[in-house]
Image (cartoon, rainbow, N blue to C red):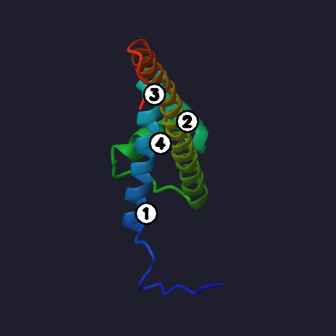
Amino acid sequence: MRNFDRESPAMSALALTDATRSALGHLLQKEQHRTGSREVAYETVAKKVGASSSWLKKFLSNHQEVKEPRITLFLSIRDAYRDLCNRVEQEHANELAKLAALRGQLNDVDKGFVELVAGSNGSSAG
């Protein structure tokens, strides 16, 4: 197990908090887009990460009195964000595959037209 120097942590608490806030913001934005409701998005994301929607609102708005996430909550937020990233990457890969298939179909149709035109002129396709 690696020992960390307390004077030089791998990531500062402020940087970790900012990264967590950013991840939660993205989760909320994606869920709001999916549901069409900001309030429903708060409830859904809060349930997903194991926090209350009121804590989520305070944390995202950077209220002074809100407590920083405990490690278990941070890990839950990290996992939810990782799941979102994996899902988005998979959706992107699926879209690329659909586009490639469509491109192939269009190229086949185009090739068929060229062959048809070349055949009607009495010349061979080249």
**From the image, which quarter does the C terminus lie in?**
top left
Please identify the residue farthest to the top as the structure is shown.
Answer: 120
Q: How crowded is mark 2: few (under 14 residues within 10 Å), some or many (20 or more)?
A: few
Q: Nearest to the eye among marks 3 and 4: give it.
A: 3
**From the image, which quarter does the N terminus lie in?**
bottom right
Q: How far apart are marks 3 and 4 (CA)?
A: 54 Å
Q: Give coordinates of residue 47: x percent, y percent.
A: 59, 36
Asked if 111 appears above or below 83 in the picture, the reply is above
Q: Name the residue under label 2.
A: 94
Evaluate whether residue 66 shows in this view.
no
SS at circle 3 = helix
Evaluate whether residue 83 shows in this view.
yes
Q: Which amino acid does label 4 sit on?
A: Trp
Q: Name the residue under label 3.
A: 107
Q: How far apart are marks 2 and 1 (CA)?
A: 32 Å
SS at circle 2 = helix
Q: How crowded is mark 4: few (under 14 residues within 10 Å), some or many (20 or more)?
A: some
Q: Name the residue under label 4.
A: 55
State the mark number for residue 16: 1
SS at circle 1 = helix
Q: How far apart are marks 1 and 4 (CA)?
A: 17 Å
Q: Give coordinates of residue 23: x percent, y percent.
A: 44, 49
Which residue occupies 58% across, 46% down? Answer: 83
Q: Nearest to the eye among marks 1 and 4: give it.
A: 1
Q: How crowded is mark 3: few (under 14 residues within 10 Å), some or many (20 or more)?
A: few
Q: Nearest to the eye among marks 2 and 3: give it.
A: 3
